[in-house]
Image (cartoon, grey):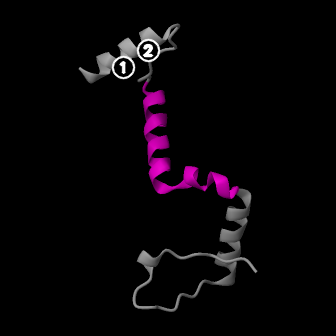
Amino acid sequence: MNALTIPKKLIKNDDLVIIPRREYEKFLRIFKMIPKSQWWFWSKEWQAKEMEAEKDIKSKKLSGPYKAAKDLKMALDNLKR
């Protein structure tokens, strides 16, 4: 039998949580598709970073590629200013 873990912050005072079978099975299908080693990528925090990066790419806020490490270092130093 598979298990679905519900975060403690969503449960108060040992509440009974009931999940309809259809919803439970939908979650199981999603989790089986994503290897456990890749769950970090789908976290809320990481997805926010991905959206920010995607926005920067679309608005052409890019730099590089750099031919030498010193050129990259100089570009990073300029960002600090």
In the rendered image, the residue lying farthest to the front is: 70
What secondary structure is the stretch in magenta mostly built from?
A: helix
Give the quarter of the image for residue 23: bottom right
Residue in front for this viewpoint, 43 or 69: 69
Mark 2: amino acid: Leu
The answer to whether the residue labelled 2 contacts the one labelled 1, judged by CB atoms less than 8 Å apart, is: yes
Q: State left or right for residue 81 relative to residue 43.
A: left
**Residue plotted at (65% across, 69% down):** 27
Image quarter of the N terminus:
bottom right
User: Residue visible at 43% across and 30% down?
Assistant: 56
On screen, residue 60 above or below 67: below
Residue 4: in magenta span: no
> Is 70 displayed left or right of 21 in the figure?
left
Q: Residue sitting at 48 percent across and 28 percent down?
A: 57
Image-quadrant location for residue 20:
bottom right
Which residue in the structure is indicated by mark 2?
72
Q: Position of residue 58 (x, y in %)?
A: 47, 29
17 is higher (above) or lower (below) than 36? below
Q: Residues within 10 Å of mark 1 (few under 14, many from 20)?
A: few
Which residue is disc 1 drawn over? Answer: 76
Could you give the CA–CA distance between mark 2 and mark 1, rounded to whole angstroms?
6 Å
Label 2 SS: helix
Is 56 in the magenta?
Answer: yes
The magenta segment: 34-59
